[in-house]
Image: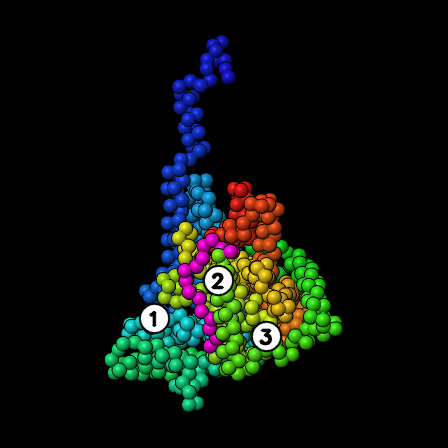
């Protein structure tokens, strides 16, 4: 190529031009060293921001097995929330101004996108920080205090025991901030519906029943826990006695009055509550719900679109259930089959301690059987142990059917699959297998334990989470055993479908209540008409929708996305498709938004 200058003909690539060209190419194509340096800088910044957050939150420290501020609670005051907002803004500015996204390796670029988007989302939604119910029939500080101390606060020496006592002595401060937040919400017109109050009050009263709160003849849950942990220490009996006396005094002098003040406030607020169920009743409630759906599903699906997906899935699952009816030669309608499954004694363990032990033993056997099969499904497997445990008595009335608690990163605490065995009529045998697969293996334990153990991810990705990904994986893992030839008993396969149906109905009812102004009673009726679950379960689920707007939409939306991506990979790769590799891509990147998950799978497909 030539050009002319003052009637002369000269080469375009003069020495100077050549140098400039080389410099331009160097800038356009960063060296491997530059990529490694920028990625290392970004990951160090991600971890610094995360470590600073943990350093400000003693409860997160305990979850992570860190004992720095072991005797403290998180500061949940309004001032602390405003302070956190400013830190988030500062962190976002630091990320955007100091990190060159174009110089990051692929995995770090994903982390950068996630960190920036999560910060922007937190800032954008800060105005909705009061659009929730910190005390409700399912959870809240009132129930979290004993649950946290019993399940999270380990006591391995005298110092740990003193930290436990310190936390007991500071429950009043924690509850003062809680009540202040409830008052702010009420001023903005945000009061829980009336049904919340009786059960939240019952939970509070249960926690402060028994010795030393009252003379019932039995120790309270908290005193029982503290005594058990201290008795296991190799300490002088005199020191053990002194610690128990100090804990007893803290329970009487601090914990009991704190709960009594909270009870008095809730009793008073109860008189001003109404029956309105949906968040549409809040100022800008529609905009809030749209944001909640976006955050929960990590998609741009609208409430109407989610509602319609739910209706279609309900119809499809009903069709598969009718096929099982024919298989077992049941003569009658689908509703009559639901009633049969709901009431026939053969499908339930006795509502006794022996029946509960049978249930737990069977759940362990199901999980152990799956452990022996996971080589055919997964390349990387978790090192952390997992146990099955009954939900504690103090929270079993209000807790969900089942849930999973991840292991501590340092190995000091195993992963725990909790089964709520308060009433065995709520835990049918035919759903036992699917529930164990969802909460245990290959479900939440595989995903969350592997994320915790990952060596290649920044901490905010290892320990953070996106509900659609996590719960979508759990629901997908109810289907995997079917593909392995399990669920040979048609009734257990019906149970699997019943649980999937439950999640499909959630799409319909959650959007029905919060976007279409359904009443609580309309939601209950929809579940009763379309599922085999008990009326009690239908009521509890609708009440869950009401106090956790959008959360229950995550399961089915996440599962459908994983199935779509698997189908896409199979179609593109044909005989090269390997389910173990597919699962490795899904699990090795930690919990990610669904759009990023799709990009990761697309990259995997392209690599083949």
* 513 or 92: nearer the viewer: 513
The residue carrying mark 2 is 372
Instruction: Using the rendered view, name the quadrant where residue 319 is placed.
Output: bottom right
Q: Which mark is residue 215?
A: none
Q: Which mark is residue 71?
A: 1
Relative to residue 584, is residue 66 drawn left or right?
left
The residue carrying mark 3 is 428
* 461 or 70: nearer the viewer: 461
Residue 72 position within the rendered picture, expressed as x and y whole percent measured from the top left: 36, 69
Determine the residue positioned at 75% across, 73% down.
332
> From this viewpoint, is residue 549 visible?
no
Determine the residue positioned at 48% across, 48% down.
110
First in residue order: circle 1 vs circle 2: 1
Relative to residue 556, is residue 149 drawn left or right?
left
Q: Secondary structure at mark 2?
A: loop
Q: CA distance from mark 3 to mark 2?
A: 25 Å
First in residue order: circle 3 vs circle 2: 2
Residue 387 lies in the magenta stretch: yes
Q: CA distance from mark 1 to mark 2?
A: 41 Å
Is most of the magenta stretch helix, strand or loop?
loop
Relative to residue 276, is residue 255 drawn left or right?
left
The part of the chain drawn in magenta is: 376-392
């Amino acid at each position: 190529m030539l050009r002319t200058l003052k009637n002369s003909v000269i080469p375009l690539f003069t020495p100077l031009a050549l140098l400039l060209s080389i410099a331009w190419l160097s800038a356009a194509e960063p060296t491997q060293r530059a990529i490694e340096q920028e990625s290392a800088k970004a990951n160090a910044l991600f971890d610094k921001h995360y470590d600073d957050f943990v350093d400000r939150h003693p409860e997160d420290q305990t979850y992570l097995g860190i004992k720095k501020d072991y005797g403290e609670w998180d500061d949940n005051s309004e001032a602390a929330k405003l302070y956190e907002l400013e830190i988030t803004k500062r962190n976002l500015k630091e990320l955007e101004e100091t990190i060159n996204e174009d110089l990051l390796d692929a995995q770090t670029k994903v982390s950068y996108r996630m960190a920036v988007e999560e910060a922007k989302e937190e800032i954008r939604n800060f105005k909705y920080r009061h659009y929730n119910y910190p005390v409700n029939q399912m959870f809240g500080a009132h129930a979290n205090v004993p649950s946290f101390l019993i399940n999270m606060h380990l006591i391995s020496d005298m110092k740990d025991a003193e930290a436990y006592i310190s936390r007991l002595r500071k429950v009043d401060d924690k509850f003062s901030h809680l009540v202040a937040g409830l008052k702010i919400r009420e001023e903005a017109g945000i009061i829980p519906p009336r049904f919340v109050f009786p059960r939240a009050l019952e939970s509070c009263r249960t926690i402060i029943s028994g010795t030393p709160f009252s003379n019932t003849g039995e120790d309270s849950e908290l005193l029982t826990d503290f005594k058990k942990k201290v008795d296991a220490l190799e300490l002088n009996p005199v020191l053990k006695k002194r610690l128990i006396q100090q804990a007893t005094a803290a329970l009487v002098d601090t914990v009991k009055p704190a709960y009594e003040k909270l009870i008095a406030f809730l009793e008073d607020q109860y008189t001003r509550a109404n029956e309105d169920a949906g968040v549409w009743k809040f100022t800008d409630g529609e905009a809030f719900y749209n944001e909640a759906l976006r955050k929960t599903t990590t998609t741009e699906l609208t409430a109407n679109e989610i509602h319609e997906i739910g209706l279609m899935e309900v119809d499809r699952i009903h069709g598969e259930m009718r096929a099982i009816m024919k298989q077992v030669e049941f003569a009658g309608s689908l509703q009559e089959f639901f009633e049969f499954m709901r009431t026939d004694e053969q499908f339930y363990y006795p509502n006794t301690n022996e029946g509960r032990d049978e249930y737990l033993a069977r759940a362990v056997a199901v999980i152990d059987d799956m452990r022996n099969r996971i080589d055919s499904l997964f390349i990387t497997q978790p090192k952390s142990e997992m146990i099955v445990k009954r939900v504690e008595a103090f929270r079993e009335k209000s807790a969900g059917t089942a849930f999973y608690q991840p292991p501590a990163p340092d190995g000091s605490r195993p992963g725990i699959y909790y089964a709520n065995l308060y009433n065995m009529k709520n835990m049918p045998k035919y759903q036992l297998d699917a529930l164990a697969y969802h909460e245990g293996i290959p479900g939440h334990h595989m995903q969350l334990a592997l994320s915790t153990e990952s060596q290649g991810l920044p901490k905010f990705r290892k320990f953070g989470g996106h509900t659609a990904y996590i719960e979508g994986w759990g629901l997908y893992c109810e289907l995997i055993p079917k593909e392995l030839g399990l669920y040979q008993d048609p009734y257990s396969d019906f149970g699997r479908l019943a649980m999937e149906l439950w999640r499909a109905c959630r799409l319909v009812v959650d959007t029905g209540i919060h976007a279409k102004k359904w009443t609580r009673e309309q939601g209950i009726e929809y579940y009763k008409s379309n599922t085999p679950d008990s009326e009690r379960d239908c009521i509890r689920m609708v009440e869950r929708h009401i106090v956790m707007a959008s959360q229950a939409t995550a399961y089915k939306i996440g599962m459908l996305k994983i199935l779509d991506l698997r189908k896409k990979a199979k179609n593109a790769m044909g005989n090269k498709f390997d389910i173990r590799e597919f699962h490795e891509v899904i699990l090795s990147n930690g919990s990610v938004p669904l759009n990023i998950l799709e990009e990761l799978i697309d990259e995997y497909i392209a690599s083949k």
